Image (spheres, helix red, strand yellow):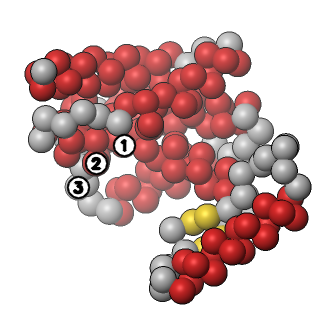
Amino acid sequence: MQIGLYPNASSERTLEAERLEQFASLLKQGQTVFQIEGDIQQKRWEKVVWNAAWNPLTTLTMADTKTWLDSSDEAHAVTKRLMREVIDVAQRCGVPLEYGLIDELIAKVLKMGRIGSSMQQDAKAGRPLEVDVILGHPVDKAKEFGMDTPVLSTIFALTTAVNRRIVDSLS
């Protein structure tokens, strides 16, 4: 688990740092394994890039990550473009992600073998998908900044449609 401070203009940084230390001491008492990150927003957005790609792509295709990437040259291109658009949004939010993260994340997932995602498991089980949690924030920020994110917007729309079908089937 990674924890850190979220910028809060209405609170003093020293007070926030004290609160973080108090929280960390509780985690230590509970023998929770964690690390305090100096820039939690960077770590958070790195995870957003990962989740925004692998969760919907494995769900929409019902394929594991390796099968998806091996399915065509376009699969690699779409995945990279999706990740790039999320990085563009992060950068507009002031988070210094580099485009090299894309190749790192693809190499990482390929080393993991044939994996699915939690969203894919939810879809298979007929449970609602975490579309807004995983894709909603970058989509909303892109709209707020007036950014053109065609792949991100398309993946969001398709995943939202799958989620709607699942939710409608539950009622």
Give the structural element (helix, strand or loop) at label 1.
Answer: helix
The residue at which mark 2 appears reads as 117
User: Dot 3: few (<14), some (14–19), or many (≥20) neighbours within 10 Å?
Assistant: few
The residue at which mark 3 appears reads as 114
The residue shown at (28%, 41%) is 119
Residue 60, horizontal then vertical, whole percent? 25, 29
Closer to the camera in the image, 131 or 111: 131
Name above or below for residue 141 compared with residue 106.
above
The residue shown at (70%, 68%) is 20
In the image, is 79 to the left or to the right of 92? left
User: Dot 2: few (<14), some (14–19), or many (≥20) neighbours within 10 Å?
Assistant: some
Closer to the camera in the image, 148 or 34: 34
The CA span between labels 2 and 1 is 7 Å
Q: Within the image, what quadrant is residue 121 found in?
A: top left
Mark identifier at residue 54: 1
User: What's the residue type where badge 1 is placed?
Assistant: Trp
Name above or below for residue 10 compared with residue 145.
below
Name above or below for residue 70 compared with residue 88.
below
**Which quadrant is home to the C terminus?**
top left
Residue 33, horizontal then vertical, whole percent? 50, 79
- Asked if one can make out residue 70 in the rendered structure from this viewpoint, the answer is no
User: What's the residue type where badge 3 is placed?
Assistant: Arg
Q: Are marks 2 and 1 in contact (CB under 8 Å)?
A: yes
Closer to the camera in the image, 130 or 46: 130
- Camera-side mark, 1 or 3: 1
- Asked if one can make out residue 35 in the rendered structure from this viewpoint, the answer is yes
Give the structural element (helix, strand or loop) at label 3.
Answer: loop
The CA span between labels 2 and 3 is 10 Å
In the image, is 86 to the left or to the right of 114? right
The residue shown at (25%, 54%) is 115
Residue 170, horizontal then vertical, whole percent? 12, 26
